[in-house]
Image (spheres, grey):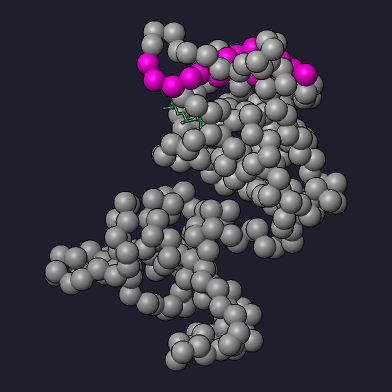
């Protein structure tokens, strides 16, 4: 996959892309990342890329000229997504990462200062991506996050098994992980994980993923397909939660935006 990033701060990418999965994917030729400094496309002797906003107001706005010129000079294949990183875009999700990972090429435009001339959004970008409901100083950190999430989904970059059950990939949050030692400061690893019974472990993990999703992100459960046993289990947990709340018992788990639910442990096999 070819990724072209358009930025005024190319040096910011050196560290993050020089390590771990992205660097390994690049070394193996599975992803090629180009960093284009669109200041190189400025036409005046001061290499100006921004100007005061029409109508007044704080901050500087990136001009369209250098950005259009830089993206056009990169000659991306026809139809390649050109994503403007902006807090006004659609929130980046695992589904966005999956969709982008299926593309042969991707352009990412990093804004800065007060923002980017509206004509870039209207006539150059094919989509707008937000990392979340907060404002960054520039699109660079958002672009790094997008590249990292996309790179690990490219075929051959990491073991496919590692990605299928991950949080958000399967539609649920992932089950808890444990490693050696089996007991740490008196906290034991659940016996089932040491049992060697792979079918039972798989059931336990699925159940834990379900519980965790119900506790932390119940909104996700509206979009996940459950088998009949899992649906019964979920219904029972929800009913118990409602009874406990009505009875004034304390709820379990961290309060979240989406609400929390007390979850009583019950096996999928019950
Ligand atoms: C200070 S922000 C400008 C915010 C702009 N004034 C607004 O209110 O929408 C500068 C640049 O950072 C990037 N940026 C900021 N927050 C972002 C977010 N949540 N997701 C993606 N990019 C973001 C965008 O490229 C943006 O042009």
Q: Position of residue 227 (x, y in %)?
A: 50, 62
Question: Seen from this angle, which residue lies furthest top?
Answer: 55
Q: Is residue 70 magenta?
A: yes
Which residue shows up at 64% across the image and 12% down it?
65
Question: Seen from this angle, which residue lies furthest left?
Answer: 247
Quadrant of the snapshot with the N terminus: top right
Q: Position of residue 173 (x, y in %)?
A: 49, 60
Residue 162 against residue 200 in the figure, above or below: above
Stretch in magenta: 57-73
Q: Position of residue 32 (x, y in %)?
A: 80, 40
Quadrant of the snapshot with the C terminus: bottom left
Residue 104 against residue 122 in the figure, above or below: below
Which residue shows up at 38% across the image and 60% down it?
216
The one of 185 and 122 positioned closer to us in this rendering? 185
Which residue shows up at 39% across the image and 77% down it?
266
Direction from residue 75 to residue 186 in the image, left or right: left
Direction from residue 256 to residue 24 in the image, left or right: right
Quadrant of the rendered image containing residue 264? bottom left
Count up the numbered dots. 0
Camera sees residue 82: yes
Direction from residue 52 to residue 6 in the image, left or right: right
The one of 184 and 162 positioned closer to us in this rendering? 184
Q: Position of residue 128 (x, y in %)?
A: 54, 28
Which residue shows up at 59% across the image and 45% down it?
145
Camera sees residue 124: no
The one of 164 and 92 positioned closer to us in this rendering? 92
Residue 132 against residue 125 in the figure, above or below: below
């Amino acid at each position: 996959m070819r990724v072209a990033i358009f930025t005024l701060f190319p040096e910011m990418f050196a560290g993050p892309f020089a390590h771990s999965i992205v660097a390994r994917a690049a070394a193996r030729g599975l992803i090629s990342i180009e960093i284009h400094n669109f200041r190189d496309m400025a036409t005046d002797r001061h290499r100006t890329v921004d100007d005061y906003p029409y109508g007044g107001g704080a901050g500087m706005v990136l001009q369209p000229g250098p950005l259009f010129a830089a993206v056009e000079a990169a000659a991306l294949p026809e139809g390649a997504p050109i994503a403007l990183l902006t807090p006004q875009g659609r929130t980046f999700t695992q589904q966005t990462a999956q969709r982008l990972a299926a593309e042969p090429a991707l352009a990412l435009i990093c804004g800065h200062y007060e923002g980017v001339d509206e004509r870039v959004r209207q006539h150059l970008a094919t989509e707008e991506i937000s990392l979340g409901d907060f404002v960054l100083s520039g699109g660079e950190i958002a672009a790094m996050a997008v590249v990292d999430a996309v790179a690990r989904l490219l075929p051959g970059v990491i073991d496919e098994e590692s990605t299928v059950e991950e949080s958000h990939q399967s539609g649920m949050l992932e089950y808890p992980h444990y490693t050696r030692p089996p007991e740490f400061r008196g906290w034991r690893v659940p016996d089932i994980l040491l049992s060697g019974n792979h079918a039972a472990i798989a059931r336990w993990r699925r159940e834990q993923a379900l519980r965790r999703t119900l506790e932390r992100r119940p909104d996700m459960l509206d979009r996940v397909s459950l088998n009949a046993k899992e649906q019964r289990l979920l219904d029972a947990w929800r009913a118990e939660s409602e009874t406990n709340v009505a009875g004034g018992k304390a709820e379990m788990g961290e309060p979240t935006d989406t609400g929390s639910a007390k979850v009583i442990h019950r096996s999928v096999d019950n």
